Amino acid sequence: MSPVFFLLAAMTPPAHGQSLLPTAELAVGARQVQAEIARTPEALRRGLMERRALPPDHGMLFVFDEDDVHCFWMKNTPLPLSIAFIDAAGRIVSIQDMQPYALDVHCPPGPVRYALEMAQGWFTRAGVAVRDTVSPLPPP
């Protein structure tokens, strides 16, 4: 299957009538975060577009229907982000930094079920690394 690309952007209060998605509290390693849950095709396409600030310990969790190599880029994204690619068991398999407005593609090393975007450097500052877990993860 070919990679799926998503537009990403940083978080601010919703612009242009965009409403916040449902949120969930997640344990990421030993830290707690509030994450908006993107699972519908529209939410997955839109991501954090048109947002200009990301509150502390907040991010967006992308929930995919199937394990696959889901890739991301930063077109139209004004803030630097870090992304954790997460397998179906909740293990982080890759963490990558993404630069604002960059068109380079960020892909996991293999199929994943989830991706969590946070402010760039959040995972490092929180002491979260590859092989740490994220829970509870919503079903697809």
Image: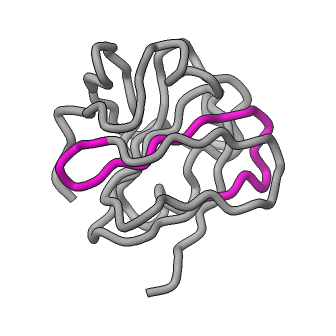
Q: Quadrant of the C terminus?
A: bottom left
Identify the residue shown where x is 52% and y is 38%: 117
Residue 112 percent across, percent down from the top left = 34, 60
Foreground of the two, 132 or 81? 132
Rendered image quadrant of residue 96 = top right
Inspect this view and state whether residue 25 appears.
no
- Of residues 136 and 42, which is closer to you in this image? 136
Q: Position of residue 123 (x, y in %)?
A: 50, 24
Front-most of residues 10 and 132: 132
Q: Residue at x 35, y 56 (%)?
A: 39
Residue 54: in magenta span: no
x, y (%) of residue 53?
68, 23
Q: How many marks?
A: 0
Magenta stretch bounds: 72-91
Q: Residue at x 82, y 52 (%)?
A: 102
Residue at 46% x, 41% y: name it. Answer: 84
Q: Quadrant of the N terminus?
A: bottom left
**Most common secondary structure along the magenta stretch:** loop
- Asked if residue 78 is among those painted magenta in the image, a careful observer would answer yes
Give the image quarter of residue 134. Answer: top left
30 vs 71: above or below: above
Q: Quadrant of residue 124?
A: top right
- Residue 63 versus residue 25 in the image, above or below: below
Looking at the picture, tell me which residue is in the foreground, 54 or 127.
Answer: 127
Residue 36 is left or right of residue 124, and the answer is: left
8 in relation to 129, above or below = below
Q: Is residue 101 left or right of residue 16?
A: right
